[in-house]
Image (cartoon, rainbow, N blue to C red):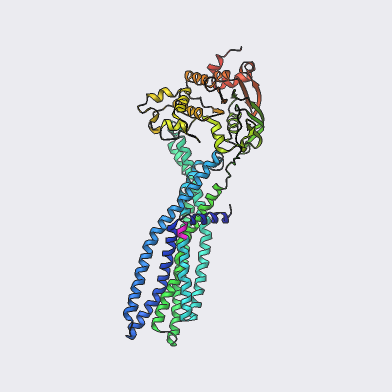
Amino acid sequence: MTTRAADLLILKAVRHGGPWLAALAVTALLGAAAELLLPLTLGRTVDALVAAGPGRERWLAATAALVALVVACDALGVLASGVSGARAALWLRGRVITHTLSVGTTMTRHFTPGELVTRAGVNAEEAGRTPEAVVTAAALIVPSAGSVAALALIDPWLAVTLVAGLLLIVAVLRAFMRSTTAASGGYQEAQGNIAARLVGALAGARTITAAGTEDQEARRVLAPLPVLRAHGLALWRLQARAGVQAAVVVPLLETAVLAVGGLRLSAGDLTVGELLAAARYVVLGAGLGSAIGYAGRLARARSAARRLDRLLAVPPPSYGSRPLPPGPGRLELKGVSVRADGARLLSDVDLVVPGGSCVAVVGCSGSGKSSLAAVAGRLLDPERGTVTLDGVPLHEVAREQLRRAVGYAFERPALFGETLGESIAFGPSESQMDRVRDAARAACADAFIRRLPLGYATPVGDAPMSGGETQRVGLARAFAQAERLLILDDAMSSLDTVTERQVSGALTGSLADRTRLVVAHRVATAARADQVVWLEGGRIRARGPHDLLWDDPGYRAVFQSASAPEASSQVAP
């Protein structure tokens, strides 16, 4: 990822700092201008006091007013920097999260969940500090440039001396920025690695506890800690080295300017007040050395922006604008192949699912069943081949219309919405309550939901549901949303035999008005389907009615590996 792309992202974040960013810029410039005028008024005040001439009160009042203005600008700048940084971080987080959800499951092939959380959280926060660092660092240039101009008016030799010192400070800052950006990248990568390991450990917390491997897992999660420490120490060393270099250059610069000023004073070319003003101006000009802190923030922000930009570079799926014509939900796959991480998941699959029919997809683990289910409803785009619904390629269908036409149910459904009713209605177009109840009855979820004190108004987090009940709510959501094509990806694996038989009855009864593609592991589910597609190694080994396929020992073995007792109870017709 190029630095230019990260810098463009930073500029966009700066623009989204809002009106408080303008307030920060104004206060920074006003404060810099006041600091620039302060040495002049202070020098004139000293000259007026030494000469005991008129105007002493006026210059003294001007000096006091400038001091008050500097203090006020500093106070308002702190507030403005905090608010503008928060707004920039909010925009970055919103963009990262929206883009991640738009890309969908493909994003997890590029980044682990822990990495995604780190980038949307810590890295967005670091990049959000860009407005303050940019504006404040830019404001430091004003006193330095102004000091050079003011010293040139007082005495050109003083200006030449200050410029020579400032060039040394700029060289220190450039080297510091370059090194800190690289070290920050390593530090942030180590943070993301730890977060990814921790999220994985939390997902398997029950297994870890049952195995008694808490200590080993803690060591695994914290294994990148030495790398994190090394990069952290490198950042501190860079900060310390740049600070020492600036600490050496700045006093030498001030001494050099004062020495030249002293020589000019002894020659009668400067007054005492002008020398005092020159001393103040050199302090202001050398204040560029204090930009090391802001340069460090900007370097970390650039490194964080690179990480965010790598995430934003993952392209989301594009959708067309073609409407779906009226039709029964005929699904067709032509020469579909899917590859992920170098492995072939599907190879040249040709399949026609007639509208309104129920097709069961069976196969051993790793045969490509979930990949077929994913491409059938465009959760995944095939590497090669086309998928059409009622004659229209899925990638040409408008997103909202596609998501209304296709409903999915999964093995481990995630329930969104505040209540169970909202969770079932969750989708591109909110379902009416009557449709929600009908879907819940078809999924055998209505009875246990009604037994809850608040019924369908029960908050999802307060509903004491088993794994099978959660699956039933997920099934109900798919039933309520699917208008043409219903895809069940191992969505009945946690149901007991009686409930599974009832749901299968609904699939061939009340839900028979739409096309159904069911990833099946049980004999009974395959037996109720109009047609069975048998996958092996990412290819279709056979297709046809279950009764005919049952004569093949290899077909029977698919079910015996998943459920031996049930398979053995099945007899050949």
444 vs 228: above or below: above
Image position of 277 (left or right of 182): left
Taking the spot 57% from the left edge, 45% from the top edge, the residue there is: 314
- Secondary structure mostly taken by the magenta-highlighted segment of the chain: helix
Toward the front, the furthest residue is: 326
Q: From where the camera sits, is residue 123 visible?
A: no
Q: How many numbered marks does the figure carry?
A: 0
**Region rendered in magenta:** 129-133
Q: Position of residue 253 (x, y in %)?
A: 46, 74
Nearest the camera: 195 or 305?
Answer: 305
Image position of 84 (left or right of 549): left
Nearest the camera: 450 or 531?
Answer: 450
Residue 99 part of the magenta-drawn span: no
Q: Position of residue 348 (x, y in %)?
A: 68, 31
Q: Position of residue 86 (x, y in %)?
A: 43, 53
70 vs 404: above or below: below
Looking at the rendering, in which quadrant would you find the C terminus?
top right
Q: From where the camera sits, is residue 218 visible?
A: yes
Q: Position of residue 470 (x, y in %)?
A: 45, 28
Taking the spot 35% from the left edge, 70% from the top edge, the residue there is: 67
Taking the spot 35% from the left edge, 74% from the top edge, the residue there is: 63
Nearest the camera: 204 or 508?
Answer: 508
